[in-house]
Amino acid sequence: MRISSIISGKKVETISASASIHDLVNSLNSHHVGALVVSSDGRKIEGIVSERDVVRAMPGKLDQLIGMHVRDIMTVEVHTCTPDSSVAELMTMMTELRIRHVPVVDAAGSLISIVSIGDVVKHHVSDLDSERQALRDYVAGAN
């Protein structure tokens, strides 16, 4: 199964690197997402920032956090996939790299969507359920 089947109709939320941490937290909350792609134009990926990045920035810097910006805590080495990537490939990448969000890009490297580990797990469970039902139907038909 390809990533294109997971991202159909799925919108990706972005934020500017110059946005405040306050704006970041509000955006994560209002969009009900765990990560935002950092992009000034909505197409070119400059980084990715997640709830985890906010939490990791807190120890020893809590008093400074209010004056910080997204660029201060974002991840700049962003791993991406394409709509033609397989779900299995993405699961392997996410597991090995211990990442929860992967932006989806087109052939030119422009941002088109994002996939979370929750999306991948939901899809995998659905596939397993379909396979289980097919096996059950097969066994029932053999009797």
Image: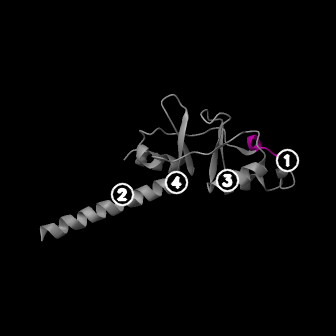
The reply to whether residue 135 is in sight is: yes
Q: CA distance from mark 4 to mark 3?
A: 16 Å
Amino acid identity at mark 2: Asp
Q: CA distance from mark 1 to mark 3?
A: 18 Å
Amino acid identity at mark 1: Gly
Q: Secondary structure at mark 1?
A: helix
Amino acid identity at mark 4: Ile
Q: Nearer the viewer, mark 3 or mark 2?
A: 3
Amino acid identity at mark 3: Leu
Q: CA distance from mark 1 to mark 4?
A: 31 Å
**Sooner in the amino-acid sequence: mark 1 or mark 3:** 3
Return the mark for residue 127: 2
Image coords of residue 49 (percent x, y)? 67, 46
Which residue range is magenta in the image? 68-72
Asked if the residue under mark 3 is in contact with the one under mark 1, i.e. CB atoms within 8 Å, the reply is no
- Looking at the image, how many numbered discs can be counted on the residues? 4
**Sooner in the amino-acid sequence: mark 4 or mark 3:** 3
According to the picture, the residue beneath numbered tag 3 turns out to be 28
Image coords of residue 39 (percent x, y)? 66, 37
User: How dense is the environment of label 1, judged by Cα within 10 Å: few (below 14), some, or many (20 and up)?
Assistant: few
According to the picture, the residue beneath numbered tag 1 turns out to be 67
Asked if the residue under mark 4 is in contact with the one under mark 2, i.e. CB atoms within 8 Å, the reply is no
